[in-house]
Image (tube, helix red, strand yellow):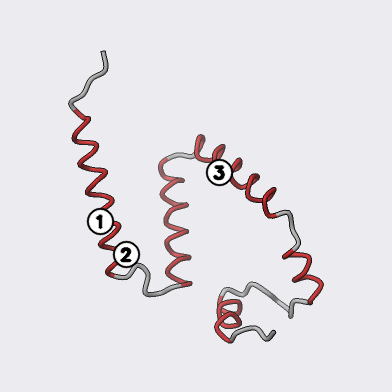
């Protein structure tokens, strides 16, 4: 099956590959133990978040935001922004509701 033009453009734009990828490399990549990789990533980020400074956390978040904008320049759209604002409003309300509560 041919690779869609859009995928070629993304790969080129991010300079992911310096040469064509072979069939055996694709099969090797697809055959990885993805569950083990996911577990390791989760473990890494749990440990990393426990030691990260606020500045480091903001830098990671900003890097993710920049990457998302490169992949999808129109992100976030108006609907996504409205949904995000709704979440922030609900969190703010929940925090205000418990701010006066002091455990005994």
Q: Position of residue 34 (x, y in %)?
A: 68, 55
Q: Where is residue 59 in the image (x, y as percent from the top left)?
A: 44, 52
Residue 102 versus residue 98 in the image, above or below:
above
- N-term-proximal mark, 1 vs 3: 3
- N-term-proximal mark, 2 vs 1: 2
Figure quadrant of the N terminus: bottom right
Q: Is mark 3 on a helix, strand or loop?
A: helix
Are dots 2 and 1 in contact, CB under 8 Å? no
**Other-residue count near label 2 (Cα within 10 Å), few / some / many at <14 / 14–19 / ≥20:** few
Residue 80 image label = 2
Query: Residue at horizontal 51%, vertical 35%?
Result: 51
Residue 70 left/right relative to 31: left
Residue 95 left/right relative to 17: left
Query: Residue at horizontal 56%, vertical 82%?
Result: 9
Are dots 2 and 3 in contact, CB under 8 Å? no
Query: Residue at horizontal 48%, vertical 72%?
Result: 71
Query: Quadrant of the rendered structure where residue 27 is?
Result: bottom right
Q: What element carries label 1?
A: helix
Query: Residue at horizontal 60%, vertical 42%?
Result: 44
Residue at the top extreme, as displayed:
104
Per the image, the residue denoted by label 3 is: 45
**Other-residue count near label 3 (Cα within 10 Å), few / some / many at <14 / 14–19 / ≥20:** few
Residue 84 versus residue 7 in the image, above or below:
above
Circle nearer the viewer, 2 or 3: 2
Q: Position of residue 35 (x, y in %)?
A: 67, 50
Per the image, the residue denoted by label 1 is: 85
- N-term-proximal mark, 2 vs 3: 3
Figure quadrant of the C terminus: top left
Mark 1–mark 3 Cα distance, whole angstroms, equals 26 Å
Q: Nearer the viewer, residue 98 or 11?
A: 98
Query: Quadrant of the rendered structure where residue 81 is?
Result: bottom left
């Amino acid at each position: 099956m041919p690779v869609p033009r859009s995928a070629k453009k993304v790969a080129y734009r991010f300079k992911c590959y310096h040469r064509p990828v072979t069939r055996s490399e694709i099969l090797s990549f697809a055959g990885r133990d993805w569950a083990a990789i996911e577990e390791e990533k989760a473990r890494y980020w749990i440990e990393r978040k426990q030691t990260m400074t606020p500045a480091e956390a903001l830098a990671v978040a900003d890097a993710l935001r920049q990457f998302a904008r490169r992949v999808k320049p129109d992100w976030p759209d108006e609907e996504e922004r409205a949904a995000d604002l709704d979440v922030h409003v609900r969190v703010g309300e929940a925090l205000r509701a418990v701010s006066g509560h002091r455990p005994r």
